[in-house]
Image: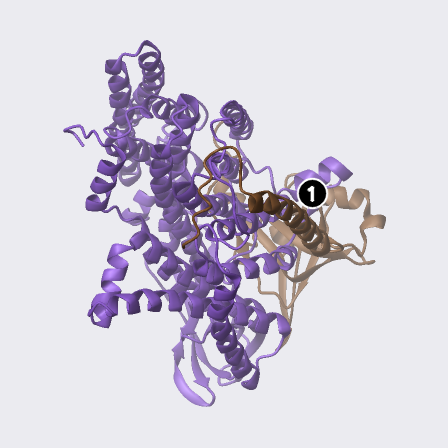
């Protein structure tokens, strides 16, 4: 009964989406606002309907209704309740249902937030968003039916994959999904602007805001995914350039390019065509990423179901791509830039270089990710590109981007003086050089690392100077340093939030260079009382014990004493967990984390029978925590930049629209 | 910002802008060439061939010694982990294309690699390495990649394989 209701709610949601698309079209073409309003209501109605469907699925999961195939597949009686809830996105059918739920949140929120101000853009935005909803709801209802029943009801379910029981893995997929799904809204508004021909600055403002929201979630998803890999997978790394990772990284890159180039359009009415292209590209990459992830078309370490949805996704991408390209070409005259670049040394030129570099990175990642397909088409033999190839090709591009990140804020709109910029760069460049000298003096070698550290420290100094210059200007008005800084941030959240994001990226870059170039590792068997050393660390194996944990867990835990330069700094407890019911082991690392490095220990084998020996794999990961800290700064910066400011919005809105309706 | 000559609103751009277009065109071509160079340079000699076990045996002579990425399913009975001495371990297992019809087995050897958690019967392995003359496939360091075992992709009553769709990769 309950599952049938869940299914019924989904069907009603599909009907609402179909009605919304039809009513929006009819209302627009017959010029009947009532129909468009009706379309909006139908779009909003998908949200409660899909919410009901999700809640009923969660109810079935928590109750353990194993007559539902999905419940049987991803949950079991002995799972704690919170895991039964999160099992909603633990399998293909459920995660598509969850995807639909998030999409309905975004579309309903866009209707609620933008309805009054953007009435003209709404009909087509509803149509485009509804079309996406129809596709995903159709997949859920006709292909990956989450409420499908089993003929015979099993006594218990399969249980959730132990690897997915980590908090990072519980939060990471929803964040990624939010990011992916969120890009539907900017796409819908961009398409609406194209189709309606209303290509003034209204669409770009809405699109920028929604892109920033989606981009924030996607960024969070990427960072959390890396953290989960580091904590759970036990290989001392966080990113492997796997096709599935790249599938999330590519739309993130396109979105990043858009968030920068949109500023040129706002300020100088240039690059309109380019901005539309970037929004469409981001959306197409989202759908393409979903296709890669769920179709299994490219071999990946990530295990995903190989289901029948591949061709459907492919058809959907093709339709959306042709549809987008058609309208972009049709409106190409309206999208002409109203201004041209005056100088190669200007803020707009800097944004152009930024876009060029980001798109170059995107192109490289796209080519390498799809290399198995391309190589098979060209040579008849399937090839594969591993992480070292990515790193070699991308490192110079990332370094240039980091360099630009520091220098670009010094440029002015329209035209900058090379001399003035040169003056501003002189001392920071020298200071960064001194820093490199210090690194060299303390024994850091390798021109790649030193060059990398020079670029990031140079950019760091320049970015900090931007904060300082702004704060000092306010201090001259008599504000003390704290008040001046707070006011600076409060009055220019978009700009200085952006610089905080830059700071986050720079801090992450320090970490990435550190861990990529200077990571050390060793694997060694130790008997009780024996010592292993790595870098300036020593580790003494004190013994291991085995005990029963919660659920069906059997835990084997080692105890090691850790010494840093001969000084005792604490104990670590790397362990191995065995889910006895499924006989699935999990190796859980334990690390001593400091600001300079992680001493990361895995117990990879234990031989209690033979003299109580255990084999450890030990990693020394320099600056790894800078990666996480940078991620945190990045997210805070994005929140600062994206948080809506009602007062500013009202005043902007008044300036843009001299005739203000009472509802505004 | 005293310069106000930039406010061109008509079709005609200022002289410097025209000049810039040429500079941009030349710069753009040079940068594209640089990117092509980066891509080609990084890839040359560093790409792997992707083979199934059957494809590998079909061209074994040609593929011995080449850097490959071979995919197959693990036969649980063949897994063996031996700690030879304090710093040397040897992990061995066989992979096949079809777990129910294991006619051609590729014997994988990984030195000094921990036994991955997901290395179990029916797990799908992607092994980066190269085959030697003895028919052993030697994994590169860190070249043992495992997907989720098919236990989580059990056949449903209709016989369609399905599975967990969230990240479950184990890289060791």
Q: Colour of chain B?
A: brown
Residue at 48% of width from left, 30% of height from top?
A: A335
Q: On the rendered structure, is A624 left or right of A22? A: right
- Give the camera-side residue of A140 and A344: A344
Q: Is residue A616 visible?
A: yes
Q: Colour of chain A?
A: purple
Q: In the rendered picture of this protein, how many numbered marks are placed on residues? A: 1
Q: Is residue B95 visible?
A: no
Residue at 23% of width from left, 45% of height from top?
A: A648
Q: On the rendered structure, is A430 left or right of A573? A: right
Q: Secondary structure at mark 1?
A: loop
What is the quadrant of the C terminus of chain A in the image? top left
Percent position of residue A146, x then y: 38, 30
Percent position of residue A300, x then y: 58, 46
The answer to whether A652 is drawn above or below residue A637 in the figure is above
- Give the camera-side residue of B114 and A153: B114
- Give the camera-side residue of A391 and A115: A115
The residue lying furthest to the left in this view is A662
Residue at 35% of width from left, 50% of height from top?
A: A171
Quarter of image, res A201: top left
The answer to whether B41 is drawn above or below residue A49 in the figure is below
What is the quadrant of the N terminus of chain A in the image? top left
Q: Which residue is mark 1?
A: B102
What colouring method underlies this structural image?
by chain
Percent position of residue A28, x then y: 33, 15
The residue lying furthest to the bottom in this view is A566
The answer to whether A16 is drawn above or below residue A368 in the figure is above
Percent position of residue A182, x then y: 37, 38
Quarter of image, res B41: bottom right
Q: Chain of mark 1?
A: B
Neighbour tally class for label 1: few under 14, some 14-19, many 20 plus, Cα within 10 Å: some
Q: On the rendered structure, is B121 left or right of A507? A: right
């Amino acid at each position: 009964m309950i599952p049938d209701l869940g299914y019924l709610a989904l069907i009603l949601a599909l009907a609402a989406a179909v009605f919304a698309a039809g009513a929006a079209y009819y209302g627009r073409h017959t010029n009947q606002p009532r129909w468009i309003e009706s379309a909006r209501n139908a779009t909003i109605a998908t949200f409660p309907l899909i919410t009901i469907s999700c809640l009923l699925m969660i109810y079935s999961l928590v109750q353990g209704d194993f007559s539902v195939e999905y419940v049987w597949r991803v949950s079991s009686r002995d799972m704690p309740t919170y895991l039964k809830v999160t099992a909603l996105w633990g399998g293909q059918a459920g995660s598509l249902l969850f995807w639909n739920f998030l999409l309905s949140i975004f579309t309903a929120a866009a209707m609620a937030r933008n309805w009054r101000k953007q009435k003209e853009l709404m009909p087509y935005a509803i149509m485009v968003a509804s079309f996406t909803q129809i596709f995903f709801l159709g997949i859920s209802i006709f292909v990956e039916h989450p409420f499908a029943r089993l003929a015979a009801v099993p006594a218990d379910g399969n249980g959730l994959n132990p690897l997915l029981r980590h908090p990072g893995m519980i939060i990471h997929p929803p964040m990624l999904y939010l990011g992916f799904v969120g890009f539907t809204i900017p796409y819908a508004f961009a398409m609406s602007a194209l189709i309606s021909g209303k290509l003034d600055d209204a669409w770009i403002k809405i699109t920028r805001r929604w892109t920033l929201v989606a981009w924030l979630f996607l960024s969070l998803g990427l960072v959390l995914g890396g953290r989960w890999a580091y904590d759970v997978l036990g290989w001392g790394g966080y990113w492997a350039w796997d096709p599935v990772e790249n599938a999330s990284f590519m739309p993130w890159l396109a979105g990043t390019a858009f968030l920068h180039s949109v500023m040129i359009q706002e300020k100088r009415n240039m690059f309109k065509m380019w901005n539309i292209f970037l929004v469409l590209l981001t959306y197409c990459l989202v759908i393409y990423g979903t296709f890669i992830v769920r179709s299994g078309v490219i071999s990946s370490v990530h295990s995903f179901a190989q289901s029948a949805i591949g061709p459907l996704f492919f058809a959907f991408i093709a339709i959306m791509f042709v549809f987008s390209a058609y309208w972009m070409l049709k409106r190409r005259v309206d999208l002409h830039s109203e201004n041209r670049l005056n100088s190669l040394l200007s803020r707009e030129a800097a944004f152009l270089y930024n876009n060029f570099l980001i798109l170059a990175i995107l192109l490289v990642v796209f080519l390498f990710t799809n290399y198995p397909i391309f190589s098979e088409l060209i040579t008849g033999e399937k090839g594969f590109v591993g992480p070292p190839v990515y790193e070699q090709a991308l490192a110079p591009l990332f370094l240039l981007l980091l360099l630009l990140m520091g220098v670009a804020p010094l440029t002015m709109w329209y035209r900058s003086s090379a001399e003035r910029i040169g003056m501003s760069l002189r001392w920071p460049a020298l200071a960064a050089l001194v820093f490199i000298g210090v690194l060299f003096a303390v024994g850091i070698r390798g021109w790649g690392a030193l060059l990398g550290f020079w670029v990031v420290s140079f950019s760091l100094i320049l970015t900090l100077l931007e904060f300082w210059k702004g704060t000092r200007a306010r201090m001259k008005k008599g504000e003390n340093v704290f008040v001046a800084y707070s006011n600076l941030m409060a009055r220019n959240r978009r700009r200085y939030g952006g610089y905080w994001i830059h700071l986050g990226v720079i801090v992450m870059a320090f970490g990435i260079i550190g861990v990529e170039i200077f990571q050390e590792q060793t694997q060694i068997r130790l008997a009780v009382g024996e010592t292993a050393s790595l870098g300036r660390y020593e580790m003494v194996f004190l013994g291991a014990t085995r005990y029963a944990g919660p659920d069906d867990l059997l835990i084997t835990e080692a105890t090691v004493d850790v010494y840093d330069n001969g000084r005792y700094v604490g104990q670590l407890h790397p362990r191995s967990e065995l889910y006895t019911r499924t006989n699935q082991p999990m190796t859980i690392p334990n690390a001593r984390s400091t600001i300079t490095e992680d001493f990361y220990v895995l117990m990879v084998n234990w031989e209690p029978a033979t003299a109580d020996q255990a084999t450890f794999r030990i990693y020394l990961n320099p600056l790894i925590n800078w990666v996480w800290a940078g991620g945190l700064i990045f997210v805070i910066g994005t929140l600062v930049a994206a948080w809506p400011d009602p007062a500013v919005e009202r005043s902007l809105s008044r300036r843009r629209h001299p005739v203000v309706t009472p509802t505004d | 910002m005293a310069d106000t000559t930039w406010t061109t609103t008509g079709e005609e751009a200022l002289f410097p802008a025209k000049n810039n277009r040429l500079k941009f065109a030349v710069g753009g071509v040079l940068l594209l060439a640089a990117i092509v160079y980066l891509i080609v340079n990084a890839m040359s000699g560093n790409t792997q061939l992707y083979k199934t076990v059957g494809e590998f045996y079909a061209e074994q002579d040609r593929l011995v010694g080449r850097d490959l990425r071979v995919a197959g399913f693990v036969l649980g009975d063949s897994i063996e982990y031996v700690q030879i001495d304090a710093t040397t371990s040897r992990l061995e297992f066989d992979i096949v294309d079809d777990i129910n019809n294991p006619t051609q087995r590729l014997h994988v050897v990984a030195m000094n690699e921990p036994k991955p958690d997901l290395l179990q019967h029916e797990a799908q392995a992607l092994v980066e390495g190269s085959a030697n003359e003895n028919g052993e496939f030697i994994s590169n360091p860190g070249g043992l990649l495992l997907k989720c075992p098919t236990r989580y992709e059990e056949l449903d009553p209709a016989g369609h394989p399905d599975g967990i769709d969230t990240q479950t990769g184990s890289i060791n």
